[in-house]
Amino acid sequence: MSLLLGCIADDFTGATDLAGMLVRAGMRTVQMIGVPQDPLPHDVDAVVIALKSRTTPPQEAVEESLAALNWLRDAGCRQFYFKYCSTFDSTDQGNIGPVTDALMDALGTDFTIACPAFPENKRTIFKGYLFVGDELLSESGMRNHPLTPMTDANLVRVLQRQTRRKVGLIGHDVVVRGAVAISAHIDTLKAGGVQIAIVDAVSNDDLMRIGVALDGMPLVTAGSGIALGLPQNFRKAGLLDEGAVADTLDVPQGLRAVISGSCSVATNAQVAHFIDSGRPAFAIDPLRLADGQDLVAMALDWAEPLLADGPPLIYATAAPESVKAVQSRLGAERAGQLVEHALAAIAKGLVERGVRQLLVAGGETSGAVVQALGVNGLHIGPQIDPGVPWTTTLGEKPLALALKSGNFGTVDFFTKAWSVLQ
């Protein structure tokens, strides 16, 4: 096995998103949950290590990321990739800046880029400002995120508050001229003391141009979009087969279910669509959990007779004002933990009742679910929507899992995802 690309993702759905993009571009990819303890499957081109470090204390995130980097270096990876969300969500304390600093120090590199752009999911960067659709990030639903509210769309400013390195910009006027112009601008920025550059991108063509310019750069930091542009470099070097198909899966057969913990705008719409279409749904109320009610048992008892007729939905998704009301009563951390633990226990109970195909919405929820199920790795398969592939777990009794970032997917995602497995 010769690993080409070693990736560190700061949450579970983000890791799946990145791995799915690499598979689309022809790289055989596995996603590991935490730093691997067991040997990887053979015939793998890229590995994505999924951490749960987006909202942990910065020093903890740095330590976990460095442990992942050490494993990837020992595995012989040729290039390294730090993946964060396409909405760049973080606080002024981190964790994007501190982790980037630590990885650059460990690799002894004096320059990298930062580019969360993902045009297919309407995340674009222009003049250093991040847009979600037609809105500035700071005017989108992300301004109300319960853990990492994003109130500044200028990524140069956002990142500069988190890093000791000087942050600059590679504007779209440079990107559109191609890889040679991008590389020349990088040299100019480095001469001026810049060590990290935000890179504009408004289309997949931009991502491909940027990708060429990143050939040989030891560390890339980005959302998942840049992953489209990197495999071409390995292919040009003869390290990756031309026209390789990497997204095939052996799909386990069994019952289906949906679990949703995300409270994003997109997931709220998906939950509403599922319910409005007449499908069964059970709501998890954090206040009832806090009162000691056994909603896990109630949800499982409710779901069991429905499983044979199609996927039921168990959800804690709620509108921003409801989330704030709960947090004011319980505190943000306790509310989040109550919901995560309950949904993870429900997922485990559903699998014990024969569910073999499970869709999970929300990064924190997905992390809790895969830990409860004892999942240590995933084969990456076909894409449902940009950034969300189906996967199967490694091991003797595989499950099909779709781990969806809260803001991803069309409004009918919960109902259409199953057709991709046929």
Image (cartoon, helix red, strand yellow):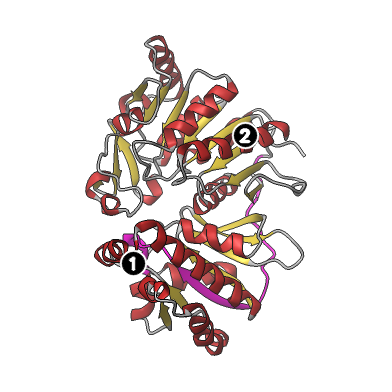
Residue displayed at 56% across by 63% down: 369
Provide residue 21's location: percent of width, then percent of height: 53, 47
Which three-letter amino acid code belongs to the residue tagged 2? Answer: Leu
Q: Residues within 10 Å of mark 1 (few under 14, many from 20)?
A: many
Is tag 1's residue or tag 2's residue first in the polypeptide sequence? 2
Q: Quadrant of the C terminus?
A: bottom right
Q: Quadrant of the N terminus?
A: top right
Q: Of the numbered discs in the image, which one, if any, rests on residue 69?
A: 2
Mark 1 lies on a secondary structure that is helix
Nearer the observer, disc 1 or disc 2?
Answer: 2
Mark 2 lies on a secondary structure that is helix
Residue displayed at 43% across by 45% down: 85
Provide residue 77's location: percent of width, then percent of height: 67, 32
The answer to whether one can see residue 70 in this image is: yes
The front one of 137 and 418 is: 137
Q: Is residue 191 above or below residue 112?
A: above
In the picture provided, is 327 more to the left or to the right than 180?
left
Which residue is outermost to the front? 291
The front one of 109 and 233 is: 109
Q: Of the numbered discs in the image, which one, if any, rests on residue 136?
A: none
The answer to whether one can see residue 383 in this image is: no
| Image: magenta residue range | 242-270
Which three-letter amino acid code belongs to the residue tagged 1? Answer: Asn
Q: Is residue 101 above or below residue 115?
A: above
Q: Of the numbered discs in the image, which one, if any, rests on residue 268?
A: 1
Q: Residues within 10 Å of mark 2 (few under 14, many from 20)?
A: many
Residue displayed at 66% across by 33% down: 70
Provide residue 104's location: percent of width, then percent of height: 53, 24
Does the magenta segment cover residue 140?
Answer: no
The front one of 53 and 394 is: 53
Q: Is residue 145 above or below residue 359?
A: above
